[in-house]
Image (tube, rainbow, N blue to C red):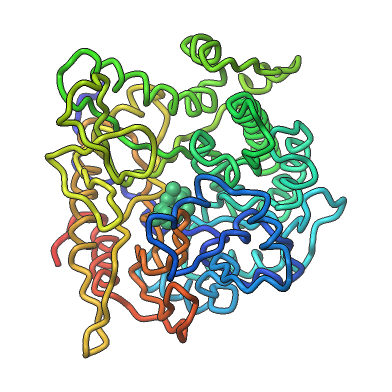
Amino acid sequence: MNFEVKKTFPKNFLWGGATAANQLEGGWNQGGKGLSVADVYSFDSSSPKETWLDQWFMMTHKQVEEAKDPKSKKYYPKRVGNDFYHHFKEDIQLFGEMGFKCYRMSIAWTRIFPKGDEDKPNEEGLKFYDEIFNECLKYGIEPMVSLSHYEMPLYLSQYYGGWNNRKLIDFYVKFVTVCFQRYKNKVKYWLTFNEINCIKHHVFVSAGIIEENHPNLEQVRWQSAHHQFVASALATKYCHEIIPESKVGCMISYQLLVPYSCHPDDIQKSMDQPRMSLLFSVVLARGYFPSYASRMFEEKDVKLKILEGDEEIMKMYPVDFISFSYYMSSAVCGHKDDTTCSATGNLLGDTVNNPYLKTSEWGWQIDPKGLRCALNQLYDRYQKPLFIAENGLGAIDKMDENGEINDDYRIDYLRQHIIQMKEAIKDGVDLFGYTSWGCIDMISASTSQISKRYGYIYVDQDDDGHGTRKRTKKKSFDWYKQVIASNGENLNI
Ligand code: BGP
């Protein structure tokens, strides 16, 4: 054993940024693209703010039917994105200028298989991504591709019932093998499903499930998750076969959960709640369900249909690395008689406010030190290389009279998180890359606003879709460039 402490970021650390096709591309009906589940989220800035998250957590038949109607007058922001479809050369050139080593992006399934069940892929869609990868490689940027990032074909949801239907495994496998074959000389890093554990929170965007159809939603949710586990294992198998030097990762949303107090019920809850979420990475990284799954399924009245051979597939093809998104931490309160526990604006789960943390304009509690804990917890658990696939601050940016955007708050957020990444590396964590979320402003996944900006590059567009879409570098652009050039050593403004 060599006890030398690693004091810096590894030499080939993959610094970069992350996006998703449905949030930035636009061109929803161009190049033969079909409708995806993302394309049916509408936005209306005049509706009450409190309702903006409703569709994200529950999509209805009525909303889907209305969205499909060509006469609908509603605005569907994810159909427009920030128009990367027509700006990608300029945008990737800016990523190159920042010195990106890696660009995490997704392939829209509906550009390759517009409905999802076709025999042959759509050549125009395949060509589009060829061009994107060529641009990346021109600037020495390694693409990392998410194969399914909240954008499955709407048709598979409507006519097959989404991932609850086992046939989805075959459609997904067909789609991903077409991608591996086509891009085998261009892409080495692949992620099977974005935030696979978020099927716990939003079944429509994660699995194409419309809640109204299902009285026992828990059964459908977990059955769909099981089909995604098998699909992910098969994707890993075929990726390794087709691209021997490839690395395949899973991707989970990691929200560090801490006990609100030292009350034993808070401690218990802070163990139980994350376990339900970590079940996903246990299955994908180790290849089998954890022992606590049995009790969990019994209590939820879930009876999984697992076919002969499924468990063997899961066991034989675990992922090579674990990637995750990290934005915030939250406290959990198990003893409900404590009136000091107050509800939080944090997006996911049954959590309460941590009085020690600051909160973003969207109610997400900012906890850079929590990232160090998250990295250590994941590494202790799995002993597999880790990759931070998303992290960042969604904030309102204002352009001043000189046309500048001084986003010091974003620089501060990112700097504090990068400091903690380095601490985790000193702790012995094998972290090989970091792609901050939304390197260019685009549509928010949850609220469908563009004014929830994460980027180093500002896009002139408002929440109703108006604007020139002109790109402008923010102050954080030069800052991040310097971070990358110094391999994480120079974090000063
Ligand atoms: C993650 C998603 C992303 C992304 C990000 C920020 O959960 O993987 O797609 O958008 O969160 O969330 P939001 O856009 O809602 O601010």
Residue 432, position in %: x, y? 37, 43
Q: Is residue 339 left or right of residue 287?
A: left
Q: Is residue 384 above or below residue 59?
A: above
Q: Which residue is drawn at 71% across and 71% down?
A: 29
Point out the image quarter for the N terminus.
top left
Q: Is residue 4 left or right of residue 363?
A: left
Q: Quadrant of residue 170?
A: top right
Q: Which residue is drawn at 39% across and 39% down?
A: 348
Q: Nearer the viewer, residue 387 or 168?
A: 168
Residue furthest out toward the right: 119
Q: In this view, does 227 lie above or below 178?
A: above
Q: Can residue 147 be seen in this view?
A: no
Point out the image quarter for the C terminus.
bottom left
Q: Can residue 157 be seen in this view?
A: yes
Q: Residue at x 21, y 36 (%)?
A: 342
Residue furthest out toward the bottom: 402
Q: Is residue 312 left or right of residue 290?
A: right
Residue 78, position in %: x, y? 56, 65
Q: Quadrant of residue 238?
A: top right
Q: Which of 183 and 27 is in front in this view?
A: 27
Residue 381, position in %: x, y? 37, 22
How many dots with numbers?
0
Residue 423, position in %: x, y? 19, 39
